[in-house]
Image: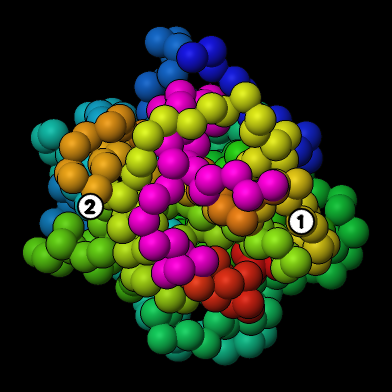
Amino acid sequence: MNNKIITIIPSLLILLAIFVTVPSCSHSTPSFVEKSIVQVWKPDLNGGAEVLEALGVAVGDGTTVLTVINYVDYSPGELAVVSTEHGKFIATIQSIDSRTGATILKLGSGRLPTVTTRDATTLKAGDKLIVWGQDHADSTLRPTEVLLQVINSNSSTLEFNVILADSTLNKGGYDGVQAQGAVVTDQSGKVLGLESVLTNRLVINVGGPGEIAPIITIHSALELLSTNSNNQPWANGPFLIAANEIGSRSGYYVGTVRDYVPVATAITQVLSELGGPLSTGDLPQDFTSYVLKNQITQSSDGSLLTTVFPHPVELHDSSGNVLAQAKWVGFQWYRNEGKPNRIVYGNIAYIVDGSFELTGDISSLENSVRTLLNDPTPYGQ
């Protein structure tokens, strides 16, 4: 079968900024924070030079690094951790929270200085924080003073929202940076969280000018250090989710879905009840293209859900036979002219390797999508 590259909205392809920088701050920033932040580099997909993936901090006993990985184009393997003070280390992934992309890396050898943390639930609206970001032009860390605008009140306490303190910058006059996992601290240098994942494939993280993507709370991320973290539903579940229901609206999600477990369970169940192969010659051009925030759209052929996994997953038929492996999967139901429900899958985002018929009960998946699209999160627009 010839590979077919799915068309993606151009605006998603050029989305680069995770948060915004300010040339200087009105306060003195704690230098020890800068010394404790590390860079995380991943191998280039084409075998070239390493690529800066994210920032992170050492936690626990100093042999582990907490960072944020975008698993759209990366499957767990070796990464390079670079400290300006202590050199370069080779690390492997130990635990993943697919809801947020928060990841624990284990250093092959050596230790790093750890950071002091603070529970984000102690913050109040109006508190001034510092974002430690990576300037892509000269690779220097640049602190940015921000004003906390909203703290999401949800039982999972996965993230909180901030906005630039200087309202004059809310008109778009700022420089962009390109490293997720940027470290957010209070003014004393206590770490509150890490910048969430940026992807230009499926999910829009950045709001209007002056807004910064939601910050993953440090305490929720540190749960990955627990001994049973790899047994949690989100350890190997779907990472990114985008949905579009007929007669409804589009939604973009980076795991911070409030009801993550039912969604992940429904997706996993459907992938174990597949039928025979189907053609992909009639894929709609908007299969992974979802409109920008606050716009209503309909798929040209049924309801859609697209998701990516940190680890490749097996696709099975109802007898348990392995049909294929996939890095990403797209689901399509209520198709035009009574065509059968199907999945489309591939191992490179988003190149299609094939398709199978959905033969099992999709009611749980359908209900999950409806819940997603009515969930008032930053991504469910």
Tell me the residue that label 2 is attached to: 95
Answer left or right for 282 relative to 341.
Answer: right
Image quadrant holding the C terminus, namely bottom right
Answer left or right for 239 relative to 87.
Answer: right
Q: Is residue 371 above or below residue 6?
A: below
Residue at the image point whose x is 84% and y is 69% from the top? 167
Callout 1: SS: loop
Residue 161, given in percent of the width and then of the height, sits at 60, 72
Tell me the residue that label 1 is attached to: 298
Q: Is residue 374 above or below residue 51?
A: below
Residue at the image point whose x is 63% and y is 49% from the top? 338
Callout 2: SS: strand
Q: Is residue 345 in the magenta section?
A: yes
Answer left or right for 193 relative to 336.
Answer: left
**Callout 1 amino acid:** Gln
Q: Which residues are magenta?
A: 337-366
